[in-house]
Amino acid sequence: MAHLAFVFCCLVWGTSFILLERVTHVFAPVEIAIWRMLSGAAVVGAFWWFRAGEFRLRRRDWASMILAALLFTAPPQVIQAYVLSQGYGHSFFGTMVAAIPLLTILVSIPMLGILPTPRELVGVLGGLACMWMIVDDGVDRGMSTWLLALTFAIPLSSAVSNTFIKWKLPHVPAAPLTATLLVAASLALLPLQVSTPALEAMRIAGPPSAPVTPLAVLYLLLLGVVASGLSTMIFIWLILKRGPLFAGMTTYVVPVLALLWGTVDHETISVRQMVAIGGVLAMVALVQVGSRPVVAAMEAEPFSADMHQGTVAEPLVAVVPTREFAAPNALVAPHESQVA
């Protein structure tokens, strides 16, 4: 079931970039983020509601979830819509997610106390060098340093968020965790959305007087319900069951799909960009070489049950470096442990 969830996330996120670019011509970045998260939370919240009696959020979990919503959920939603609205093509920004697995190794050093192996260190440094090729390609396309920095903040935020979730809230099921994160993040953005001077000062006020078309509303609804709601819930389930590095392996496929959609839209895809992506994926593969599967002695549970039932058991199969798998799961053993 984890592999089906993996494929679903890849397909959804690989396609979401082109849909998001379409709606940026109609809606403002903050407006897009709020509607995406609220509609996604509504679907996931309904899923949680029917089984609400089986899990209740604990008071001590709220601080971690609100922190994750404010730092790792709300800003990337706005940044992603903003950078795509700049007109440089969705295929370019879709390739940036390839850095997530490598950045996950880096952020695991301060957050989980895990030092990379020599192989992992080579993979990280080589992958970052390839990512620099993509950044250099962006400079040649006329992108500012600030825009590229914002773009790079998206995969960095994802890497930190994935590790934080596995670290702090492992016992919180995917459905309540996803719904809470989305609602808290959208509420945090509401004051900004109603402050026109603040939006104009930050240059995220959006297109002036753009007509709202039924197609744009449909795209926004799909982004919210499927991309921000269902796929986020499934992705968090993957993090909790298989770890942040395994879940981050969706970046094997997402950049390729982004490039394919770019060719459909006749976007400019440079040879340097394709070589860089190939290099990044090769470095991610290098990191995975030598990692042995860890099979937990537990009985498989239905996928839908894991969405709303808390679990502190180890994943069935975790294709992650042994040291990384062992450290976070050591935190999972006691019932009092937290991971998010």
Image (cartoon, rainbow, N blue to C red):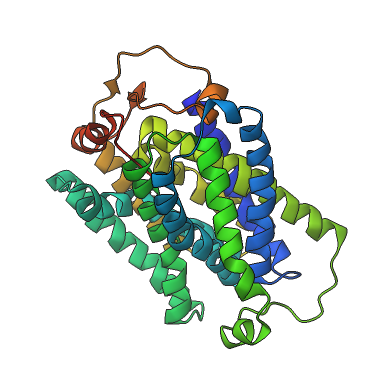
Question: Who's the residue at 28% across and 37% down the image?
Answer: 288
- Relative to residue 156, is residue 255 drawn left or right? right
Tell me where residue 105 appears, x and y as whole percent.
Answer: 26, 49
Q: Residue at x 62, y 81 (%)?
A: 199
Pinpoint residue 25: horizontal percent, then vertical percent: 73, 70
Q: Is residue 315 above or below residue 240?
A: above
**Quadrant housing the C terminus:** top left
Q: How far from the left and from the top, in percent, is residue 216? A: 79, 60
Residue 298 rendering spot, x and y as whole percentages: 35, 14
- Image quarter of residue 247: top left
**In this rendering, does residue 266 appear at all?**
no
Asked whether the viewer can see residue 210, the reply is: yes
Vertical comparison of 238 with 111: above or below: above
Q: Residue furthest left?
A: 118
Q: Give 234 or 139, whichever is nearer the viewer.
A: 234
Vertical position of residue 174 compared to residue 312: above or below:
below
Left or right for 213, reference 110: right
Q: Nearer the viewer, residue 2 or 119?
A: 2
Image-based side of 10 in relation to 105, left or right: right
Q: Is residue 208 left or right of residue 324?
A: right
Residue located 46% across and 42% down the image = 250
Q: Nearer the viewer, residue 103 or 331?
A: 331
Q: How many marks?
A: 0
For residue 292, above or below residue 110: above
